[in-house]
Amino acid sequence: MKIIFCVLLLIFSLSQIQSARILGVFPYPSKSHTILGQSLFLELSQRGHSVTFLTPYPLKKPPNENYKEIAITSKDIFDAFNEELDGSFEATDANPFMMLSYWIENIARMQESTLSDPAVQKLLASDEKFDLCIIEFLMNESLLGFGAQFGCKIIGMSTLGQVKYINDMIHAPMPLSTVCHPFLSFTDRMTFSERMENVITTVFEDIMFYLYHYPLQGQIYDKYFKADKPSFRHMLRHSMSMVLLNTHYSLNYPQAYLPNMIEIGGFHVKNTTNPLPKDIKDFIESAEHGVVYFSLGGNLRPSKMSAEKKQHIISTLTKLKQKVIWKWDEELVVDEKRIMVRKWLPQDDILAHPNVKVFVTHGGLLSGTESIMRGKPIVGIPIFGDQMMNMARAELNGWGVQVLFTNLTETSFTWALNEVLTNKKYQINVEKIRDRLLDQPQTPMEKAIFWVEYVIRHEGAHFMQTSAQYLSYIEYNNLDIYGIILAAVFLAIFVPIWIIRKIISKVFCKKCLTKKQKRS
């Protein structure tokens, strides 16, 4: 009996050693972004870690005793988010400079609302202890204060994949000749004019960040986190242990990553799907010619688009021989035998059904990943953010076509749907991409869990960080070296020329003086 007790005690002790206290900060009021965070933290809790997840969209019931949520209930954060999105349909062709300025201000407003929320304030005032903090970064660098507040390591998650402000935090290389700014609709194969626009946009972003965004983030950081903390500049340059990127080279472009940049694209997609509700299942399986699934994501409110655009969409969908499942945020008068309209739909489970032929999407990264994992080609109607870039990538790789919202008419939308429904190349290409995405030694979720636990085991894994984080901009880019070389070249070329000219000038003047003396 004593032996059994000792064995159980040893097992219990080992489990406690392996278990970590992890804080998740996913405050952006986007349901799709919350799904990513919840997927990771639910898995961490099931593996024995004690997790606390900060979110505007809490689950109705915690799945196990290791999983705890802190709900953000501030109304202003949702108002700011909805204001940002509701104007997106009218601003699809806005220039990147206007978009960036607006995002900087609005995201700062959302952060203020998050950090002043009573539940968040209670957490910050508590004596909670955490071993690790995983933060979704979307131009919200002041949230590094959670790591400073609780004295824990930080892992960042980029739900948009590789973006410059993430790269700058860990000092990763990002050649602008091949890496497109997320606001632009270019691929990794840019023309001269596209590279020019990409450089100008990125340089403008850098200027805006250093003159306006970072000072604003620093003010929020100083305002809400404890006084005896590292400086914002120090946290910005040295606090990030690792970044989890919601992408993968098999569906993106090959890019230069540091060892502490880990691609986990597709980790939120389940290996098995849930049974569909009976009404949806019957609707799909009764479709003789298949089903078109139409959703502009969980954030956009499609009712905010103009009546003209709405009518173009309805006219197109009613003429299809395929049935349509349509996510829409208000009541619509349609033929319910052919078009099913719902405010919420189990997207991944629907896409997994073999009778679904095409996914009409806004081109969000999560929706694109799900369509690939389920082998469904897409028609994209990009609205804002990185969606234009995502759809440019889909077109380049041949698994979808896009219709710009400004050019959305019954004619253009009908052509796009018929092209993808009738041309087999889109189905073939999406299946090829799916196969190479799934051809990995670990599932994306297993990979994510491994590297999270790796950072914990190795106390931040600082050996994976580049020494570039200790260099200034001038040192990192060797501008001082190039300056010295240019100065040396200048001296080597122009000093001898100057000396020769002086010698020639003196000799010539001496001869002239001698001639004048002889004449006189």
Image: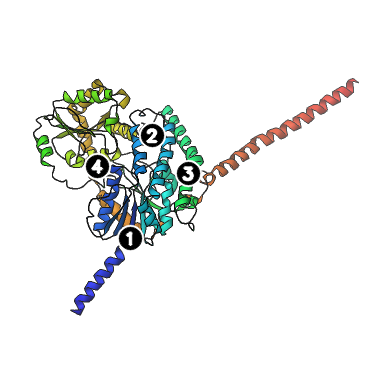
Mark 2 or mark 1, which is nearer the start of the sequence? Answer: 1
What residue type is disc 2 on?
Answer: Phe
Tag 4 near tag 3, CB within 8 Å:
no
Q: Residue at x 17, y 39 (%)?
A: 350
Which residue in the protein does label 4 denote?
Answer: 436
Tag 1 near tag 4, CB within 8 Å:
no
Which residue in the protein does label 3 denote?
Answer: 216
On screen, residue 69 above or below 180: below
What residue type is disc 3 on?
Answer: Leu
Q: Secondary structure at mark 3?
A: helix
Which residue in the protein does label 2 denote?
Answer: 183
Given the current orientation, which residue lies at the most extreme bottom position? 2
Image-based side of 488 in relation to 82, left or right? right
Label 3 crowd bin: few (<14), some (14–19), many (20+), radius 10 Å = some
Q: Between tags 4 and 3, which lies in front? A: 3
Which residue in the protein does label 1 denote?
Answer: 21
Residue 335 visible within the image: yes
